[in-house]
Image (cartoon, rainbow, N blue to C red):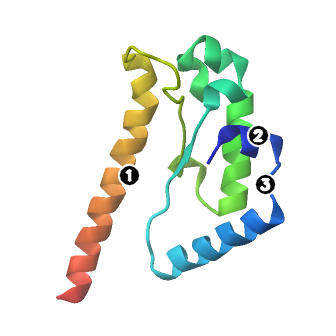
């Protein structure tokens, strides 16, 4: 989810309906949900200055809270990240939030597949 769209609250009703349909189907299938909140650096100037502020920023926290309410996903499953747009060099500090999100996604996928294989036995 684009952090700018979520931060401005400018999601159309049609998009909200599509998201709700997707959310309902995912819930029925018991698929774990994780949301990547992109463009956190554009949403908050403090994060743009220093990516280490990503977990301290009130604007980011509000966007995470709004996403949690909108999608019914726990705040701990919403990961704000900075996009690599126009960056040439890889920065390990920028990678940390991305890698934290990836690690949680992989844990959820592993748990889901393990649980699914137990159900089919």
Task: Indicate the quadrant where residue 58 lies.
Answer: top right
Q: Dot 2, crowdedness within 10 Å: few (<14), some or many (≥20)?
A: some
For the point 74% across and 44% down, which residue is it?
A: 5
Which mark is on residue 7?
2
Going by the image, does 43 lie left or right of 53? right
Residue 19 in view in this figure: yes
Going by the image, does 100 lie left or right of 45? left
Give the distance between the C-alpha atoms of the residues marked 2 and 1, in whole angstroms: 23 Å
For the point 44% across and 65% down, which residue is it?
A: 32
Which mark is on residue 11?
3
Give the distance between the C-alpha atoms of the residues marked 3 and 2, in whole angstroms: 10 Å
Q: Name the element at disc 1.
A: helix
Check if mark 3's residue and mark 2's residue have beta carbons within 8 Å. Answer: no
Look at the image and tell me in which quarter the C terminus lies: bottom left
Give the distance between the C-alpha atoms of the residues marked 1 and 3, in whole angstroms: 25 Å
Name the residue carrying label 1: 105
Q: Name the element at disc 3.
A: loop
Which callout, 1 or 3, points at the residue further toward the start of the chain? Answer: 3
Q: Is residue 109 above or below residue 7?
A: below
Which callout, 2 or 1, points at the residue further toward the start of the chain? Answer: 2
Task: Indicate the quadrant where residue 63 lies.
Answer: top right
In x, y percent, where is residue 22? 59, 72
């Amino acid at each position: 989810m684009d952090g700018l769209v979520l931060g401005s609250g400018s999601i159309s009703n049609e998009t909200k309906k599509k998201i709700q349909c997707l959310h309902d189907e995912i819930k029925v299938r018991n698929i774990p949900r994780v949301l990547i909140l992109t463009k956190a650096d554009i949403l908050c100037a403090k994060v743009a200055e220093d990516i280490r502020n990503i977990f301290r920023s009130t604007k980011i926290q509000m966007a995470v809270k709004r996403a949690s309410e909108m999608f019914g996903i726990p705040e701990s499953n919403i990961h704000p990240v900075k996009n690599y747009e126009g960056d040439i060099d890889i920065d390990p500090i920028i990678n940390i939030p991305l890698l934290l999100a990836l690690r949680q996604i992989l844990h959820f996928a592993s748990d889901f597949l393990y649980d699914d294989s137990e159900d089919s036995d």
